[in-house]
Amino acid sequence: MIIDAHTHWGIVWEDRYENDPSEWLKVCDRHGVDRAVLMGHRGLGMNSDMRLCNDVIRETADRSGGRLIPIATVHPDFGEKSIRELERCLIDLGMRGLKLHPWLQGFSVSAPLMDELALMCGRYDVPVIFHDGTPCYSMPSQVGGLALRFPGTKFVLGHAGLLDLWRDALSFGKRCTNLYLTLCGPHQAGLKTIVDGVDENRILWGTDFGFGWSDPYGYRKGIVDDIAMPEAKRARIMGLNAARLFK
């Protein structure tokens, strides 16, 4: 089983296909990807419609035959509206997690509402996925700090620190048992160090597919395929861990 733990629906794909993932899934098929975690773009901006974005993600996932795992998006600066929207997504829509992008959304993870969002995700046992690796609001150490403060909530570093901050992601990945790292951003040497140093049950694999028209699967799979590891460990990283985390 291969599960891509970091994909997007929005911007170019949604513009062309609305909520029909048929062509999108053909790309997954070419690379043997069974399922994918689907996150939206539209709800990230201050002038966006969170509810519409989440509805589109849910509808798109519904049309995938169970292959797409829908993830909610809210904006912490919207206050109580975001709390109500996240609750709707988790209870009424059955979405499997929350995606936040502090760098693009322009908020600090120390914002008061972040505590409420983290606690809610802990109560419903769904992970909070962060874009990470870009200062000043999306650093692995900041997400790691949240993981230390809220041990009952699972957090995901969506890019494991990217090219420059992967060592920070590695450090907190070793320290925080509720922090997951997605192999989607560091160079191969960084990925190998993470694979060797972090609990193999808390490593995911992802591509960032859907951010544009490009097909990143050959590259993202290739650099992980070239890392030597036991096949049981590879199976966990490439799919089994995500299946467990997102139920």
Image (tube, rainbow, N blue to C red):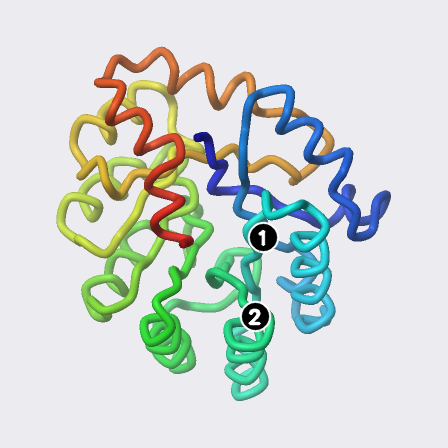
Residue 223 spot, x, y in % from top left: 41, 17
Residues at marks 2 and 1 touching, judged by CB atoms closer than 8 Å: no
Residue 6 spot, x, y in % from top left: 50, 42
Left or right, 28 with reference to 236: right
- The amino acid type of the residue labelled 2 equals Val
Q: Which residue is mark 1?
A: 39
| Image quarter of residue 52 | bottom right
Left or right, 139 with reference to 147: right
The mark lying in front, picked from 2 and 1, is 1
Between 199 and 173, the one nearer to me in the picture: 199
Q: Residue at x 65, y 65 (%)?
A: 54
Q: Which residue is mark 2?
A: 74
Between 60 and 137, the one nearer to me in the picture: 60
Q: Going by the picture, which residue comes out furthest to the right?
A: 16
Residue 122 spot, x, y in % from top left: 32, 71
The N terminus appears in which quarter of the rendering? top left
User: What is the crowding at mark 1: few (fewer than 14 residues within 10 Å), some, or many (at least 20)?
Assistant: many
Q: Secondary structure at mark 2?
A: loop
| Image quarter of residue 27 | top right
State the separation of the CA atoms marked 2 and 1: 11 Å
Q: Secondary structure at mark 1?
A: strand
Q: Residue at x 57, y 42 (%)?
A: 7
| Image quarter of residue 130 | bottom left
Q: Residue at x 68, y 55 (%)?
A: 62
Between 134 and 176, the one nearer to me in the picture: 176
Q: Residue at x 30, y 33 (%)?
A: 236
Say above or below: 228 vs 33: above
